[in-house]
Amino acid sequence: SDIKKIVKKSFRNHYKNRIEVLLFPKLTQNKTKKIISVVGLTHIEQALSKKNGAILLINHFGAGKLIMPALGYLGYEINQVAEKPTGSVVSNNRSSFISKKVRELELEFEGKLPAKFIYISETLLPVFKCLNENKVLCLSFDGLLGNKKIPIKFLNREFSFSPGIITIALRTQAPIVPAFVVRQKDNTHKLIIEEPVILNGSKKDIIDNLTRLAPIF
């Protein structure tokens, strides 16, 4: 019975997150403040004080895209690395007509957010340019992007994570700042920003660094 309750609540949360995408074009600074509060903002300031940008490490937990208006309307220049909703990773030829239309709407509505999307292509130049200009780069810890994945123990099983996150952080010396959006009982959200994570400094330490990040998530 507990499993059934958990599954039901998970489906509810998932579709609430999906439906809230429809709010993006109507969000303003005041409306955003009403639906999402921010905890730990000083940790971003701490990271940006190094002048190497900040990698805000997010995940597919909660309404993650609300991070962009939450911080964007506070004056931070947010850059989100992502696959296009209509791209090949999240789309396929078997998708229904309605499903494709929904992803087209999502792509349109993303453009209304106070953030710049860096859609993955053949070059990572915009990623390094963003950090070089001391801006905030949002990367997903458990994202679908990247071909070479490394299996790491996660939630009592193995999950494959992209080493690109660590490679970018080591190459740019940008601090990694974990962040989570947690839905509250009243259906508002709380953005919780953790302390910056200090990485081991060698490219040989990629597995070690991923292993240190996994327990936080």
Image: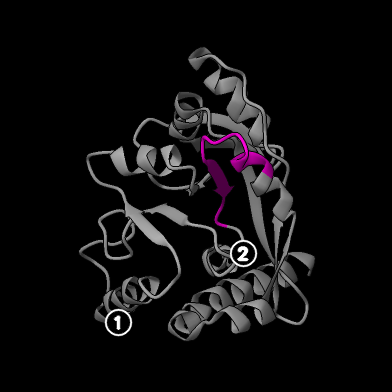
Looking at the image, which residue is at 63% across and 40% down? 47
Identity of the residue drawn at 33% across and 64% down: 85
- Is 55 part of what is drawn in magenta? yes
- As measured in the structure, the alpha-carbon distance from the residue carrying label 2 to the one carrying label 1 is 24 Å
In which quadrant of the rendered image does the C terminus lie? top right
Q: Assign a secondary structure to mark 1.
A: helix
Q: Foreground mark, 2 or 1?
A: 2
Task: Name the mark on residue 123.
Answer: none
What range of the chain is rendered magenta?
46-60
Residue 80 at x, y percent in the picture: 43, 54
From the viewer's perspective, is 192 left or right of 61?
right
Q: Give coordinates of residue 15: x percent, y percent.
A: 54, 77
Residue 212 in picture, x, y percent from top left: 67, 29
Q: Residue drawn at (30%, 48%), measured in percent from left and top? A: 120
- Which disc, if any, is residue 62? 2
Coordinates of residue 20 in the picture (x, y in percent): 53, 80
Q: Is residue 148 above or below residue 66?
A: above
Amino acid type for the residue under numbered disc 2: Gly
4 is within the stretch colored magenta: no
Q: Which one is nearer the viewer's eye here, 95 or 217?
A: 217
Q: Which quadrant holds the N terminus?
A: bottom right
Dot 1 amino acid type:
Ile
Q: Secondary structure at mark 2?
A: loop
Above or below, 121 relative to 4: above
Say few, some or many: other residues with alpha carbon within 10 Å of mark 2 (under 14 / 14 to 19 / 20 or more): many
Task: Residue under label 1, please give it.
Answer: 98
